[in-house]
Image (cartoon, rainbow, N blue to C red):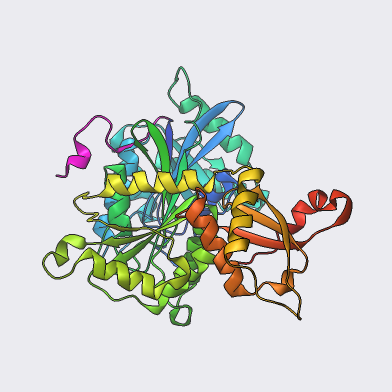
């Protein structure tokens, strides 16, 4: 085991709130119920059985009380990729850590043999169980729901996620069954959100399990094991973070199921909401078109990024870090500012160093520079390398100012934005990156015609819809 796990300040899982675990057979609406309680589209909902494999959690608040809801895979299903055992292990872990269960049944389908088997399993674990009769889309189904009393958990609470029936009643039925705690407020907002992205089988879920110090995600050689974006909280040196595990990406032309499309959509959304993106590569595999498309998206979103070369232990004696670094810089010429890390997620080698470096990028992305210092640097850059003539005239930049953070955003007021070529803009960006505290993060640069009477100060919002890097 790596030294990553030994000191008290090492990475550890953050668990504080009572957990309410949603269980049931496939296609009874567990993920729909999860999204409904969260009031967010977090879990993929699809008619195909077995879409949910990993556990996903979200903190719900009601009148000052907080608890985590946990979505799980369908119980009793034979997974199409022979991952049945791994899915069941995730369900078992959820029930082991949970304080109470929501057993979800399908009102319209009635009691099935699998419902009865699941009920017997829940009776054996001895934890509170609230029976939820879902898909009662109108009151005419309510009498059918009464049949589920036979499962031994009392009268079910009748719901419909589609018709938005009885959400508040469900939450109010959950709260009395949760353990009393002195302080059930949620943890402080995580210091940093990390999106873990890359194509299939590059070791993203293994990395997240290393951070969480548990088998939080299913790890398999089967491509596409992770189907949804899953948030996993962890702590390092007393600080709270969130790692967002994402589905492995594939070329859009090779999508053959709805879950492939939604998985790609969720991965892109995870990049947008992340503070720092870790772009994973397999040390044994060449850079692919999918990798290039992914990094182009990261760059377009102006997200701080670290290129992470995983499974480095498998190449000892076969390659050197310099060769891989040169390979990455050649492949992603517009992201030469992005640092490169070499890790082995399975053993934890260099993982803590990687998280520390991600923190540095996060801090860089939030830095602000004084206008006076920025303009001194700008004038030196213009004197050293003046812009070329445009329509027989020398274009002018009057002054610049930083107008935003995450990413650092600089507005330059000039005589004519069209007079400055892309090459010259890249020159200015390189100067800013070399001399300002933004060395390893993307910078947005706007060139705006100077307005009279200080009107540029009132047009700041107009910059947000234009980008030039």
Task: Provide the residue span drawn in magenta.
Answer: 1-16
Q: Residue at x 27, y 69 (%)?
A: 324
Residue 169 quadrant: top right
Residue 3 among those drawn in magenta = yes
Residue extending farthest right = 453
Is 174 above or below relative to 222? Answer: above
User: On the picture, is 19 further left or further right than 411?
Assistant: left
Q: Residue at x 42, y 62 (%)?
A: 51
Residue extending farthest front = 383
Q: Position of residue 26 (x, y in %)?
A: 41, 58
Q: Is residue 99 visible?
A: no
Question: Quadrant location of the N terminus?
Answer: top left
Residue 229 quadrant: bottom left
Question: Relative to the observer, which residue lies in front, 364 or 412?
Answer: 412
Q: Position of residue 193 (x, y in %)?
A: 46, 46
Q: Residue at x 33, y 40 (%)?
A: 95
């Amino acid at each position: 085991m790596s030294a990553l796990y030994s000191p008290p300040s090492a990475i550890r899982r953050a668990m504080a709130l009572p957990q309410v675990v949603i269980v049931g057979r496939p296609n009874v609406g567990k993920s729909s119920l999860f999204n409904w309680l969260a009031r967010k589209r977090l879990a993929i909902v699809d008619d195909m059985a077995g879409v949910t494999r990993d556990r996903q959690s979200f903190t719900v608040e009601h009148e000052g009380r907080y608890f985590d809801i946990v979505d799980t895979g369908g119980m009793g299903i034979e997974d199409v990729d022979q991952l049945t055992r791994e899915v069941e292990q995730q369900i078992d872990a959820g029930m082991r850590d949970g304080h109470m269960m929501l057993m979800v049944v399908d009102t319209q389908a009635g009691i099935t043999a699998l419902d009865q088997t699941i009920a017997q399993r829940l009776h054996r674990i001895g934890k509170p169980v609230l029976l939820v009769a879902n898909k009662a889309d109108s009151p005419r189904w309510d009498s059918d729901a009464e049949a589920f009393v036979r499962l031994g958990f009392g009268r079910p609470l009748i719901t419909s996620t589609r018709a938005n029936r009885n959400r508040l009643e469900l939450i109010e039925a959950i709260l009395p069954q949760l353990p009393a705690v002195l302080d059930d407020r949620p943890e402080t907002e995580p210091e940093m959100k990390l999106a873990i992205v890359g194509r299939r089988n590059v070791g993203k879920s293994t990395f997240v399990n290393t951070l969480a110090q548990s088998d939080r995600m299913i790890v398999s050689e089967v491509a596409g094991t992770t189907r949804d974006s899953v948030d996993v909280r962890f702590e390092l040196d007393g600080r709270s973070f969130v790692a967002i595990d994402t589905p492995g990406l594939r070329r859009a032309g090779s999508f053959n199921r709805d879950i492939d499309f939604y998985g790609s959509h969720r991965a892109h959304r995870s990049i947008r909401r992340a503070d720092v993106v870790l772009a994973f590569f397999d040390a044994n595999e060449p850079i692919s078109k999918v990798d290039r498309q992914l990094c182009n998206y990261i760059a377009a979103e102006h997200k701080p990024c670290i290129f992470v070369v995983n499974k480095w232990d498998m190449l000892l004696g076969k390659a050197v870090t310099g060769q891989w670094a040169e390979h990455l810089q050649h492949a992603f010429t517009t992201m030469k500012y992005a640092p490169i890390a070499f890790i082995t997620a399975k053993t934890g080698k260099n993982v803590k160093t990687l998280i520390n470096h991600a923190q540095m990028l996060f801090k860089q992305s939030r830095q602000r520079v004084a206008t006076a210092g920025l303009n001194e640097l700008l004038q030196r850059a213009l004197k050293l390398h003046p812009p070329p003539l445009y329509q027989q005239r020398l274009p002018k930049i009057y002054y610049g100012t930083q107008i935003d953070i995450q990413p650092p955003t600089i507005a330059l007021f000039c005589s004519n934005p069209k007079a400055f070529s892309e090459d010259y803009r890249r020159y200015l960006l390189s100067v800013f990156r070399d001399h300002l505290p933004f060395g390893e993060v993307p910078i947005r640069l706007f060139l705006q015609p100077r307005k009279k009477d200080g009107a540029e100060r009132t047009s700041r919002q107009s910059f947000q819809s234009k980008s030039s890097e």
